[in-house]
Amino acid sequence: MTNVPNPLMNPDRAVGIVGYGAYIPRYRLPGREIARVWTDGLGPAPVQEKAVAGVDEDVVTMAIEAARNALFCAGVVDPGRIRAVWVGSESHPYAVKPSSTIVAESIGAPADVLAADWEFACKAGTEAVQASLGVVGSGMAEYTLSIGMDTAQGRPGDALEYTAGSGGAAFILGPAEESYAVYQGSYSYVTDTPDFWRRAGEAYPSHGDRFTGEPAYFAHTLAAASNLMEMMNSSPSDYNYAVFHQPNVKFPARAAKLLGFSPEQIGPGLLANEIGNVYSGSCMVGLTAILDIAEPGDRILMVSYGSGAGSDAFDLRVTGRISELPEDRLTTADYIARRRAIDYGTYVRFRDKLKD
C-alpha cells in the first residue's frame, strides 16, 4: 500500500447517489463488420458489437441526455440546487470551449455553478465523481453532477476500432439520506505509465499494444481494488456486485478472477460485448446497470481505469430508497435493447473517418 497518511478518501459527511442515468446511442457496429473490411473476416472480434454515436451526436448532446435521465431519477432535486457540473471525457467536441457549460445551461443549472471538463483518459468520469465526493462531503455543495461520456475513437484498421464505443453515464451526488446508494469509501492509485496517448492535433490515439495489459490496466486495477478492500477490511465475498473498466470483455473478467470475484458478481455490469468500450463512461454505465437491478443492502465495488495511468476504486452500499426508483425511467437495459445495426460505410460517415 502507498505510504501516505490516510489514503482512504472519506468525506466529512456521508455522500451518495441521489440520481443516475445512462445514455447509449442506438446505432451498433458489429465486430464482424470491422473484421470484414480489415481482415477479410479472419479471426474473432474482441466484442460482439459497439455503440456508435450518430452524425448529430457528440459528447455534449449525449451528456445532456444522461443528465436529464439522472434528474428524472432524482425526482425532487431542482437543477437550480446543483452546485457543480463536471464532464469527464477524452473526446470533448471543442479543444478550447468547455462541454460542461453547455450541459449546465441545458439542464437548467444556475449560472453561479462550478463547471469544468475533466481529462484522465478513461477515468475522467470517476475523477469527477471523486471531486464531487469532496465538494458535497465537505458541505460546500448540496448536489453535484458528474458525467463520464465519450464517442468512439480509433484509427481505421487499428485494434481499438473494434472496441471504441460511444456513450456514458451521469450521477447526481448528494446527502446520504436521499441516496439510492452511499459511498462507504474511495481510493485512487496512479503512476506514470504511458500505455495510451494522443498528442495535440492528432486525430487518433496511439497505444503500447500488449504494454496496455500487465503494467497498465492490471497493475492499477488490481492495486486500487485490493488496497481499497484492505482499508475497508473487506473481501470479494462481502460484495454482491463488482464492476471494472471494460476496454474489452477479457480484461475485466480476468481482473475479477485474479481478485477473487465470480462471473455472477461481475455479469450484470459487464456490458462491453454489447456496447464496446465507452471510455470515460465504461464502468459508470456498468454501475447504472447494476443499480437498475440492485436490492437494499447490496454492496458494490467499482473500479475505473485510465491510461497514463490510474484507477479510482469505490465501495458503495445500496439503500432502501432503491425501491423508490421511478418505474417509467429509461434503464440501461432499455438503451442496450434499443439498437440499429449499421455497416462500416455508415460508421465512417457518422464518425467522420475520412481525413485529408
Image (tube, rainbow, N blue to C red):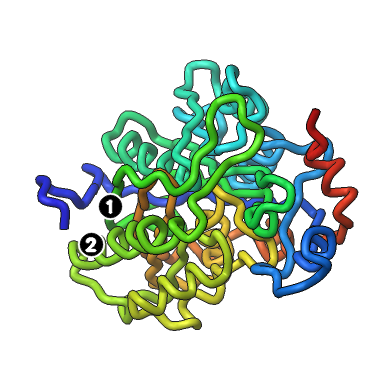
Seen at 81% across and 70% down, the residue is 41
In the picture, measured across the screen, residue 284 lies left or right of residue 7, that is right
Label 1 neighbour load within 10 Å: few <14, some 14-19, many 20+? many
- Between residues 196 and 176, which one lies in front from this camera angle? 196
Per the image, the residue denoted by label 1 is: 187
- Between residues 195 and 87, which one lies in front from this camera angle? 195
Seen at 34% across and 48% down, the residue is 15
Give the quadrant of the C terminus.
top right
User: Given the image, on which type of amino acid does mark 1 rest?
Assistant: Tyr
Seen at 50% across and 40% down, the residue is 197
Label 2 neighbour load within 10 Å: few <14, some 14-19, many 20+? many
- Above or below — where is 241 with respect to 344? below
Seen at 72% across and 74% down, the residue is 43
The reply to whether dot 1 and dot 2 touch (C-beta < 8 Å) is yes
- Between residues 350 and 326, which one lies in front from this camera angle? 350
Give the x, y percent position of residue 64. 66, 37
- Specify the label residue 114 is tagged with: none
Per the image, the residue denoted by label 2 is: 227
In the picture, measured across the screen, residue 291 lies left or right of residue 64, that is left
In the picture, measured across the screen, residue 50 lies left or right of residue 174, that is right
